[in-house]
Amino acid sequence: MSHRTGLEVSHAAAEAVKLAHVDVVAAYPITPNTHVPERIAEMVANGELDAEFIPVESEHSAMSACVGSSATGARTFTATSGQGLELMHEVLTVASSMRLPIVLSLANRALSSPLSVWGDHSDVMAIRDCGWIQVFAENGQQTFDLLLWAFRVGEDPRVSFPVIVNFDGFHVTHVIEPVFIADQEEVDRYLPPFKPNAVLDPRRPVTMGAYGPPFIYSETKKAQDFALHKSKEVMLQGFAEFEKIFGRKYNFVETYKAEGAKVLLMVIGSFAETAMDLVDKLREKGEAVGLVRIRLWRPFPQEELRQAVRGAETLIVLDRAMCFGTLAPVVSEIKAALYPEEKRPKIVSFVGGLGGRDIRLEEFEYMVRRGSELAQKGQEEIYETIGIR
Amino acid sequence: MEKFSIYAPRLINPEENIAPGHRACIGCGEVLAVRYALKAMGPNVIAANATGCMEIISSCLPTTSWKIPWIHVLFENASAVISGVEAARKALTRKGKVPPGRVYCLAMGGDGATSDIGLQSLSGALERGHDFTYICFDNEAYMNTGVQRSSSTPYGASTTTAPPGKVSIGQWSQKKNMAAIAAAHNIPYVATACSSYPFDLMAKVKKAAEVKGPAYVHVLSVCPTGWRHGTDTTIQMGRLAVESGVFPLYEVENGKYKLTFDFPKLRPVKPYLKLQGRFRHLKDEEIEKIQKQVDKEWLKLKSLVAMSMEKKPVAVPAAIESKGQGAGSKGQKAKSKAKKAKPARRPGKKPKKVSRRGKK
Amino acid sequence: MADGPLTWKNFIGGFVVDKPGNAAEYQTGGWRSQKPVWDNTKCIKCGVCYIYCPEPCIRQTAEGYFESDLFYCKGCGICARECWTNAIKMVQEEEV
Ligand SMILES: Cc1ncc(C[n+]2csc(CCOP(=O)(O)OP(=O)(O)O)c2C)c(N)n1
Ligand code: SF4
Ligand SMILES: [Mg+2]
């Protein structure tokens, strides 16, 4: 049986990596992810984890080493944040095109400049289209669980894609929380050994990373996109099996007190926890307000999202990143997903929680009030930045 | 010229691990060097290749020229990729997931991939001590993208980004000494080789592969397209580069320099330069300048070789030998302590390391 | 790539090529304007032409002489220049 213990979430992430019997970890320190690789290095140094830890000289090399390792058939993990992810960017697209199921825990961090080590979603939003499966964890337990799920789903031969597990920098990474740490036996039941189709091995030589001239490049991208969409079936199986063994339930889009809600808040990441408190408060007052949390970010669960918001009159979407010169990333995704609907809710966009700024309960309440007002006036095209001076 | 027995070509490993049908230019010395390197490595190898000529000419989907397991990821990261391969092999072997035994790990890239954009990842991999061989196939420019300058382009050469003009002679900087940079990592084996000296090249690559830990081989790879000479003179051009001292062949084994071919008198550089279009614009005084630079570098190399052969023991105080690796003021302290520590040594006994050095 | 037509459905995951050396199906001989011709009376069967061939497309015949596989030979002329005994001549394609 799993046991419940209080520990820093970064260390819970390291526990998941250890229980997954990872073979190779290549990582470079950057706040606020640093505690994950540090803890893993310690486990390796103490012989608690039989793995190779490569203390690379940059994140570009971290991801490159992960590509080499995964292509050789090893279960491979890395962790990063903010600037580190951006430095990896070039290699991320290669990892997904080569279908290498590397798992990356991303402690979400703002992007320079000005330099900020604190949390928001600018880092992941800048690489959202790089072909990786991307999920969001909102707390320590979810981080632990989704990392195990990431190995299982990513390595499934029907999927074979790398996975990013997002968890908010500081707001989640550095918090000490009670987490159910699974037993080795349970994890082994959930996570079969990694058996890739093709690996770098002199016994059966293959070429990986051949180049694609115009007569064949489009076909490679079509194949890749099709496979990513199709992997959703296996992801759901991964959740179902997880629930069976560990008793915790996950879905692509999760709702909280959304039944019959006229106004729906929509949040991605750890701020969902504050939003839940607000929903509790407003529901107690008899207001028809609910919450939708986006768990799976790529491939984007368009159909599941449409179902989750059906019947609502107003959607209030919070983004923790900007897309300079156009709509914020989550709201633009939502608008695109709902466009084919005959009866669409009004959609109001808020941006907040940038560079580690907190969003308090009162501010969530303001969003609901102000959002409803804008929607009523038909002024929902305007977006507001929460708490801006 | 390399002195091999006239029938030696028939004795080499007949296996070809890069297949014909590749798209290298006519008379390409770089692909020839790759061919030799693969012969030396044999089939028991995994290779990571940087973006560049050798990658593009060999791997057009859905085909490959490679008969060994081969991966291309990006331009600047072959060393990091091979670090991952090597670590994975280590872990998988230890856990019994692959059969035991050593598989050679090979990373290769052009001079751009090595001495410019990939220098950081190479330095990282050398410093961490991965068990791999890095081969730089140096054709002295970014040839794949159309002959742009690199830091390995020699002084005076014409390239598309350092063209000669009214106020420029072309490449204004001296060729970066990559082998010395590799050697500065204190790795067990560094060598230079050339596509015109197949037996030497193969012997060095074999040595590099067999050494435990990182090894670096820098191969001058003649490129008729970028150097602008006849496709049939590829071998001749490499020979002239070596025999004129423009590109000396040597090894650095555990820090000791050894010349592969010592010439009592170097050929002049002029005939070498005159045969190539990339140097055609050079006037005599510039050629003279290049000659002086080559002579200077040759002497520098000879003195490194002489120092490596030095019989005289170098006295190293005992305390420094045992602990004195600290930097800055700590190191200074160690030194002053060392002086005091001297009398503590048992009389009549030389410090171990010193006597061993003396014997060699 | 799996056997069959070049469609998006026919890739091996990650666009892996699992047929080592299959680029050998590509003909490079068409690039050639000159081809090497051996005078076997001069050939001492040393194989220097074979060792310096960048393709490589020079092979030894049953009698121990050497010949170039014209499917691949790009006509660089290295073999002719390097031959110890000048046994190889480069001749214009159309002359023969
Ligand atoms: C990040 C990045 N920058 C630039 C390029 C373009 N590029 C591809 S190969 C190359 C030059 C390769 O030169 P070198 O490493 O010397 O190899 P060669 O082609 O000369 O054998 C360049 C500039 C690239 N592929 N990736
Ligand atoms: S450009 Fe030079 S190195 Fe590149 S394939 Fe052509 S001859 Fe070889
Ligand atoms: Mg080059």
Image (cartoon, coloured by chain):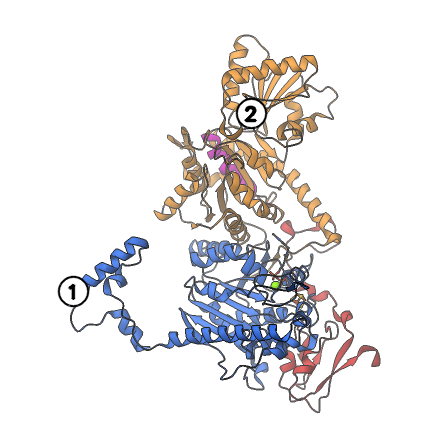
Q: Assess mark 1: CB under 8 A from ligand 1?
A: no
Image chain in orange: A
Depth check: give the residue in front, B235 or B131: B235
Q: Which residue is label 2 attached to?
A: A352
- Image quadrant containing the N terminus of chain B: bottom right
Q: Is residue B95 visible?
A: yes
Image chain in red: C
Q: Which residue is label 1 attached to?
A: B344
* The image quadrant in which ligand 3 is located: bottom right
Depth check: give the residue in front, A333 or A44: A333
- The residue positioned 78% from the left and 74% from the top of the image is C33
Residue A330 higher or lower than B346, as above or below: above
- Quadrant housing residue B227: bottom right
Q: Assess mark 2: CB under 8 A from ligand 1?
A: no
Q: Amino acid at mark 1?
A: Ala
Letter of the chain that mark 1 sits on in the rendering: B
Left-right relation of B36 to B303: right
Bounds of the magenta span?
Answer: A140-157
Q: Amino acid at mark 2?
A: Gly
- Locate residue B56, reporting x and y percent: 66, 60
Secondary structure beneath disc 1? Answer: helix
Label 1: how many Cα within 10 Å (few below 14, some 14–19, many 20+)? few
Image chain in blue: B
- The residue positioned 28% from the left and 53% from the top of the image is B330
- Locate residue A92, reporting x and y percent: 58, 45
- Quadrant housing residue A181: top left
**Main secondary-structure element of the magenta-colored stretch:** helix
